[in-house]
Image: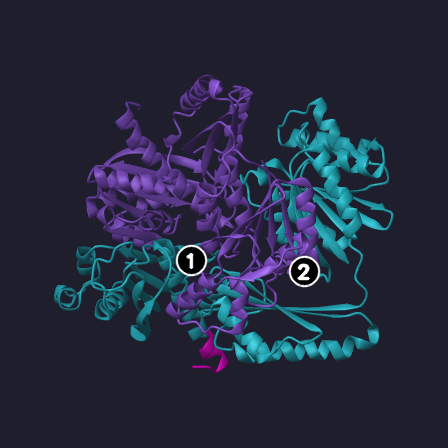
Chain colours: A purple, B cyan
Amino acid sequence: MISEIITIGTEILIGSITNTNGPYLSRKLTDFGYEVRYHESVRDNYDDIRDAIELAMKRSDVIFLCGGLGPTQDDMTKQALAHALGLELVFDEETWNHIVNVSMSFSKKITENNKRQAEFPKGAIIIDNPKGTAPGCLLNYEGKQFFLMPGPPREFEPMADDIVENYLEKVAGENFVTSLLLVNIGESLCESILRKEKIETENVEINTFAKTGEVEIKLIAHAENPEDVPKIGKEHAMAVDRVKELFKDNLYGNGERDSFETLVDLLREKKMTISFAESVTGGTLATMITGVAGASDILKESFITYSNETKEKLLKVNPETIETYSVVSEEVAREMSEGLYHKTNSTYTVATTGEAGPKPSTNHEVGTVFYSIRKEGEEILGGKRLFKGDRKAIQYRSSKFILASILLHELGVHHGRK
Amino acid sequence: MISEIITIGTEILIGSITNTNGPYLSRKLTDFGYEVRYHESVRDNYDDIRDAIELAMKRSDVIFLCGGLGPTQDDMTKQALAHALGLELVFDEETWNHIVNVSMSFSKKITENNKRQAEFPKGAIIIDNPKGTAPGCLLNYEGKQFFLMPGPPREFEPMADDIVENYLEKVAGENFVTSLLLVNIGESLCESILRKEKIETENVEINTFAKTGEVEIKLIAHAENPEDVPKIGKEHAMAVDRVKELFKDNLYGNGERDSFETLVDLLREKKMTISFAESVTGGTLATMITGVAGASDILKESFITYSNETKEKLLKVNPETIETYSVVSEEVAREMSEGLYHKTNSTYTVATTGEAGPKPSTNHEVGTVFYSIRKEGEEILGGKRLFKGDRKAIQYRSSKFILASILLHELGVHHGRK
């Protein structure tokens, strides 16, 4: 099915907001076996919307119109669609009652303008919007499907899920979709390994998605004829196994949970605790952990020890070590994690020191991070790594790397790896 | 000038990456007085690219083609453009030498494929790409301007800046652009105030941009005829003054520096220090500060005190206070910031306690945050606030609110406000 996503809103064309609805829906549609060929964004302008609809009718089968369903005069997507297709707009009493109820529960005022939200092109099937007042709709017209959807992502995304699950025509045959999640490896390295190993076959498509320090590899296969299902299913499973084997040192999951959630769950399950003594990462490690529900079971206390004095006072780092090796050194990181262990008795104690830039304070390059990870007081991982980017990127990447290393270490113990 | 931005790349259509080039360039063009009417994204497909170009020629004056300038067979933007316009591709010796040099300095292998990157439609003006191997180009054709630009944002963005500054035809007349930065106010409230006060005039356009907890208000005016410049300039200045007055309690800057940078600079300048005792915010406050260059001058040490024991041990919170009022209370926040002051002697000591969810541990609603801000040991701000969103959003929003409150407090002292 050739699909097209048209986003309507002047705020997109002036760069005031970034279109995240397009990618969201695109991923869903691709997984579902649809081919998204066009994204188009136009202003809140009657003629532009109508032109976009007329163009889409010529080139696409399933057309999504996002935005412009609100109550103001700027919102004219339904009007433009009705006009382009020569249909009249019909007032829907039930929708109107719903809008009145929702608005009252939000203590919002209702005006005559809101009535526009209860009008739909004749023949449209109304799609509920549990997160807002503007319902969506589906219109079947001359073999084409039009979906009208609200613009705000928190309304758009649940409706996109609903549409893919309940309203779209299934493509003939069966879809095989597997998602694998990796840490501590870059997307481009992933891609070049996949290309070199020629995992992709005629039937199995492989896409990689970079997610700030994580990579998702998605394997999609589609069997159009029932008799091909076993063969293509097997081809898909073999490709999945090969990818798993290729990236076994970086693989941490195949679900929807990110690496932080996976780590917090794992440590909770094992009744372990963690504390940080952060210099260069400046609180980023703690924030990554405390951002996950249940973090309070594993993190009781954590420290940002930016100055030398604090390192000495709080973590009992020897001033001579700082003087001899400088504060940005493996030796200092090691004493920090040791002092932290004596202070907190946490299962994992982790220390960082380094150069976040923009100017280095020692003779180390900006991006240098020394880290030391202890488990029950014994150093299990540590050393020096160089991270690219600006200050925040260095903090983020080094923290992500450290937590991913702990996750892989715990999984390895589990899975019989190192 | 009617402009159109065409983004080329299958990875966009499958949702693997989000198109950030479109919004980036859109903002630049809007500030420059251009009208961006269309964003379109198409796959790495010869026919689709050519169709998009032919369509753009009918409806736009200035057309940006982004992506598809790489060395592989997937990269075919220049070929499609040359074909659409009936032009031949010409090999540019100088560009080729540059590509060879750049590749060698990156220790990258050069293949025969790379030669594609040195070919341009006949008549094109080559635009340097200091960040990568693929140069861009400008082609003037039958009154239309075509700009070909590389897809990766770190190459795209500097080239966008260069193009707007050096290659675009100026719209006739003069542009007035002012940007005002606000904190602790939502974009929708901003907008409704602006609408109610009718600040926008026929000549002065006002756009708001939401940036995670900050709002940028941009006032743009354009005087096409030289004789209108004084009048329109005055109209613009008056609108700026009215907006400044309307939002004086939330205004912190009018440059490019965000509120965190502004706060760190201000505290450094005044030789002040800051420390945090974070429970509900879990390190987010410290991370916001340490993400700014120069943070080490103002933050020496900071604590994440998640458990009751740590609050008692480290900050000397009275166990009875926790028992009487519960750990999520104004009283506990106040004792935390006090204990922190005695421990660190920092100019500002800030404490948070609350419910980040997903389930509350006390009888307070998820999103409840108690905070206490002391300056030289005296509580100057504090109390209870409710924040919306999931766990991370509550941590982020409450931290942002607190730092913005400190910033506005310090600015107020400066500016004669409370």
- Say if residue B252 shows up in the picture: no
Residue that mark 2 sits on: A46
Q: Are marks 2 and 1 in contact (CB under 8 Å)?
A: no
Instruction: Find disc 1 in the rendering and name its residue.
Output: A131
Q: Give me the chain letter of mark 2.
A: A
Residue bounds of the magenta highlight = B411-418
Give residue B351's mark.
none
Q: How many marks?
A: 2
Question: Seen in the image, is B166 located left or right of residue A140?
Answer: right
Left or right: A147, with A13 as reference point: left
Helix, strand or loop: magenta stretch: helix
Quadrant holding the C terminus of chain B = bottom left
Say what amino acid the circle numbered 1 marks.
Lys
Q: Position of residue B110 (x, y in %)?
A: 68, 25
Q: Earlier in the sequence, mark 2 or mark 1?
A: 2
Marks 2 and 1 belong to one chain: yes
Left of A208 or right of it: where is B78? right
Going by the numbered disc 2, the residue's amino acid type is: Tyr
Disc 2 to disc 1, C-alpha distance: 26 Å
Question: Residue placed at 51% from the left, 50% from the top?
Answer: A359
Question: Which quadrant does the N terminus of chain B fall into?
Answer: bottom right
Report if residue B245 lies within the magenta region: no
How busy is the neighbourhood of tag 2: few (under 14 within 10 Å), some, or many (20 plus)? some
Whether residue B302 is situated above or below residue B272 in the rendered picture = above
Where disc 1 sits, the SS reads loop
